[in-house]
Amino acid sequence: MWNDRPRPGESPVKPYLLPLALLLAGCANHGDLAPAIRPVDGAGLATAQTLSGPAAQGAPAAAWWREFGDPQLDALIDEALQSAPSLQLAAARLRQALAQAGVADSATRPRVMGNYQGDRERMSEHFLYPPPFGGSTVTMSRLALDFSYELDFWGRHRETMKGAQSEARAAELERETARLVLATGIARSYVELDRLLSLQALSDRQLQAAREAAHLVDQRFAAGIDNEPARNRARVQAAALENEQAAIAEQVLRVRHQLAALLGAGPDRGLAIGRPDLKNAGALALPSVLPAELMGRRPDVVAQRLRVEAAEHYAEATKADFYPNVNLSAFLGFQSIGTDTLLKSGSRIAGLGPAVSLPIYAGGNTRARVAGRYAEYDAAAAQYNATLTTALREIADAVGAWRAVEEREAAQRVATNESGRAFDAARRRHEAGVDNRLAVIGAETEAIAEQRRSADLRAQRFAAAIELARALGGGYAESTVLARR
């Protein structure tokens, strides 16, 4: 009867196994497998001309929206950051990533299991045990602590753990990105609400003036002073403004509903939002070094860089499958035929030994999996490059919008002031009997139109400030992330 168990005093490991394992490890053929794409060096991206501007040491602030000076906006964003569904989703994904990191970390540690096995079986009369055990029915009992530990010589579990940790950090930064997207979304909608309410008030003044003008033209038509086309034009202007009032009211309602949804509340929550009181859009300020600072200030850019690191770790972990796998196992406990003698000293068992798995031929499976991992790395690197260049484009667009608004505001201030003076002059001429009331209404309508353009530009300045804050990372810093843990 053959038995491959070692004799007493004989090592369970054959002396030739270790050299053979090392020989086979040296034959692992994967030198031609490597990434095809690398992350771009941000220092090589030209930005000096496009992104020149006043440098700021710590711009933007973590709560950048507070610079607008509106307590209601501050309260709305604070409310959203507490319970918005988008943040709950990001937090759930973070918990999932942290759990995966924990699973990967556990693979690097020893395992101890407490096991009991009791099998009722009939013994063969013609196998290991002669009668009286052979041919009888007995209970085979085993109670033991089983220990196992994989000796991670090639870094399979270590690299997997590092990859999972990088992904967990990336998920944490994606939560920061969600916070930034939520804050900017609320700020944008709030600025739009401010603009629409301003336009609504100015449109109402225009409508009152148009109705008065239509009434005067009706009187002049009845008196034979004006013709029918003039009367029709006056009525059309009043009707168009009435239509505009209804359209603005609908837009105001939509924005209120949008704000409520961003807050994670029902539409009635939006109806309770008061008139915005935005005071200051701030000044243009850029980090001192771009894009170097951008690579560490935007959470989405940093998160994608961590995805690249994770892909690299996973590729290294998969490459370990080319090499032998060495497991150390041990056990300590009791084993007996029957249960009445299980815990007696003579039933004690103990063992210790390695198990070596040698990957000799797998039909190209390991090479294909490593190649797949490097393809994942290439995809992550390409996504990082796209994220970085997109971030720079967004900053450039926001800076361009800010500067365009500044230039337009200078000209608009002149137009608004001059139209106001023209309106004042028309009223004085009317009071002096030089011009009629229609001339005053015409001057007032032009002045209100310029005020509407000023309101639009004011909203565009706040929108540019919001976009610039978002493009620069919204005040993200590693210290703020650590404070939220």
Image: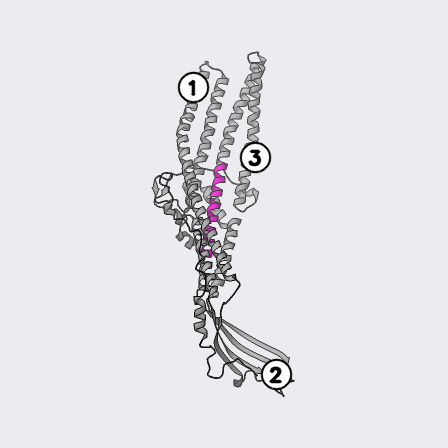
Q: Nearer the viewer, residue 183 or 385?
A: 385
From the image, tell me which residue sits under label 3.
250
Residue 418 picture location, percent across and down: 41, 23
Q: Which quadrant of the figure has residue 57?
A: top left
Residue depicted at x 58% and y 80%? 141
From the image, tell me which residue sits under label 1.
425
In which quadrant is the N terminus drawn? Answer: bottom right
- Secondary structure type for disc 3: helix
- Please give the label number shown on residue 158: none
Q: Nearer the viewer, residue 134 or 240?
A: 134
Which amino acid, by three-letter code, is at mark 2?
Answer: Phe
> Main SS of the magenta segment?
helix
Q: Are marks 1 and 2 in contact (CB under 8 Å)?
A: no
Label 1 vs 3, first from the N-terminus: 3
Q: Which quadrant of the figure has residue 135?
A: bottom right
In which quadrant is the C terminus drawn? Answer: bottom left
Q: Is residue 248 magenta?
A: no
Q: Which span is picked out in magenta?
A: 167-193
From the image, tell me which residue sits under label 2.
127
Query: Is the residue 247 above or below the residue 341 in the image?
Result: above
Label 2 vs 3, first from the N-terminus: 2
Residue 258 picture location, percent across and down: 54, 41
Foreground mark, 2 or 3, reads 2
Q: Residues within 10 Å of mark 2 (few under 14, many from 20)?
A: few
